[in-house]
Each structure stands twice: as structure tokens, then as C-alpha cells.
Image (tube, helix red, strand yellow):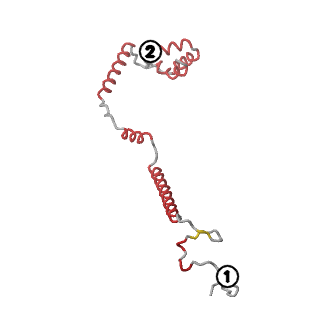
Amino acid sequence: MNCRAVRKRLVAYQDRELSPAETEQVAEHLGSCSGCAGLERRLAAITPRPCLQVDPETQQALWERLDTAVQEAMDEVPHPRSESSWARAHRWLAEETRLPTAAVLAYAALLLLAVAWGASNWWAASQLQTRLEIQPTTTALDTPILPEAIPADQYRPAAYSPDDPSGDDP
């Protein structure tokens, strides 16, 4: 045992509350470590001794009876049925995640809005693509004009006549 582990058990060692194996380990360490032995002597000077002294055989029998009782109680506990992977995942999420419900709902709402916005943009782009599948013609300003946007009776080449200031043909 190291010094840290022994120092944690010193009061229990003095009160004779440790198992026989632990008592032996602590006593062995106290015999070889002067720092821990000094701490044990200082604690013994200020720690009151328990009134009841139990002999080691009785204490060992008590530990064995306690172990037997715990084992019997554990054997009586019904074993859980084998659960599906969905049930295990649900149980794991319920036990391991500690998120406020409002935060989860806000995240779900934002996620839904993002998906809806993306779907609406995709829909608008696909509609625009279907409208533009006909090759557009361009004007002098490089703005596309779809052929169906110009009625057939209004489509004519531009003509310039110096006599007509409006630019219309007679």
C-alpha cells in the first residue's frame, strides 16, 4: 500500500474497522514508513478509542455473514430480460443525456427550419431550371429573354429610318 492509501485508512485502522487483510497491509506499511507512523501516533493521541472491542475472529465471521447476505439478496433480484437494441439506445439516451427539454425542442425547431428553408430553395431552383431549359436568347444588354416571353406578332427586327423620328416603320 502507498502512503496516500494508508493515510485514508488510518482512523479506520485505529478503530479496528478494517478487514484483517487491510489491517495487515496498513500495519506493514506503518512499520516501514516513518512519516505515516508519526501521523498514526499523532492521530492516536487525539482520536478517542471506541468503547467496544471486537475480537478479530468475530469480526471476520461478521464480514463473512454480511457477504453471504449480500450475495443472497443479489441472487433474489430478478434479472432483466434481454432488451432490444432500440430499448437499450433509449435507456442509454435517457440515462446519459442530461439536456433541458427546452434546449432540445429549440434545436429541433431550428433544424426543421433549416431543412424547410433548404427544401424551398431547392424547389425554387428546380422550378427555375425547368423554365430555363429552353435556350434563351440574349439582347444587347446580355439579359436573357425567353422566346415565349415575346408574342409572335410583336417580334420584328429593329429598323431605322431617318425620315421617321420615332423609329417605327410606316
Question: Where is 111 relative to 10, above or below?
Answer: below
| Mark 1 residue type | Tyr
What residue does disc 1 label? 160
Position of the C terminus by quadrant: bottom right
What residue does disc 2 label? 21
Disc tally is 2
Give the residue displayed 48% in from the left and 60% down from the top: 123
Question: Where is 29 relative to 94, above or below?
Answer: above
Residues 77 and 113: in front is: 113
Q: Residues within 10 Å of mark 1 (few under 14, many from 20)?
A: few
Percent across and percent down for residue 53 are 40, 16
Residues 28 and 131: in front is: 131
In the visual, does 40 lie left or right of 65? Answer: right
Percent across and percent down for residue 77 are 30, 30
Percent across and percent down for residue 117 are 50, 58
To which quarter of the image does residue 141 belong? bottom right
| Mark 2 residue type | Ala
> Of callouts 2 and 1, which one flags the residue occurring earlier in the amino acid sequence?
2
Asked if labels 1 and 2 touch by Cβ distance under 8 angstroms, the answer is no
Helix, strand or loop at label 2? It is helix
Residues 13 and 65: in front is: 65
Give the residue displayed 68% in from the left and 86% down from the top: 165
Residues 165 and 39: in front is: 165
Percent across and percent down for residue 145 are 58, 70
